[in-house]
Image (cartoon, rainbow, N blue to C red):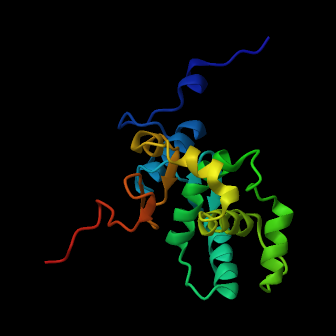
Amino acid sequence: MITSSEDDMMGRVSRTGQPKNPHPVRLIGATALALTLVSGCSGVGAGEAAVIEGQVIGVTELQETTEQLNEISAEVSTPTSVLSDLSLMPFFDRAVAGTEAELTDSQVIDLLRANGLENPTELTIDVARTRQYGLSVEDPAMAEALAALNTLTIEDFEALDIEVSERYGQFDASILEVTQTTPEWITPAG
């Protein structure tokens, strides 16, 4: 039988009424709460650039993808433009699924390698696929997918589960882009 004194269970109290040795779980909980408050209200964690439809995109992964895309493209990519492309991915993937316009990973990898990128990251492959769909809108093979895309409403876009780190901005469903914003806690000098 395990017994403990009331003194051990309650913690020792100093003359000021404060515990001398607060319970470690309380300290951890208080520290976690403080870190949450300091890091902002976003659902995106430290080291994360965004969460798009459950896919966590790390800051390092985003930076590497941006660099890879800039190696092979004349058009400059930014982390924000990459996140904008990724925000469109769920719609393109659903619209082209099962059609002749659907691109496989191996097709996209072949395209990237043909343009000089030997070892693309998974995120680079996703962005390249989305961009390729966007470039193929005139292709007759995209007709069925475009018909599906044309039925989407602003409510469909607003229903996307997209959270972006304040570092990169926020997803604007009205223009289908991640836009740079100034966090509320930053105030202009003056």
In what quadrant of the picture does the N terminus appear? Answer: top right
Residue at 83 percent across and 80 percent down: it is 113
User: Extreme front residue here?
Assistant: 140
Q: Nearer the viewer, residue 9 or 130?
A: 130
**Residue 158 screen position, x and y as percent:** 43, 44
Q: Is residue 1 left or right of residue 168?
A: right
* Residue 50 visible to the viewer: no
Tell me if residue 26 comes above or below residue 175 in the rendering.
above
Tell me if residue 63 comes above or below residue 11 in the rendering.
below
Residue at 41 percent across and 39 percent down: it is 155
Write down the quadrant of residue 14 in the picture.
top left
**Residue 128 screen position, x and y as percent:** 69, 69
Residue at 46 percent across and 46 percent down: it is 157
* Residue 76 visible to the viewer: yes
Q: Nearer the viewer, residue 52 or 8?
A: 52
Write down the quadrant of residue 105 in the picture.
bottom right
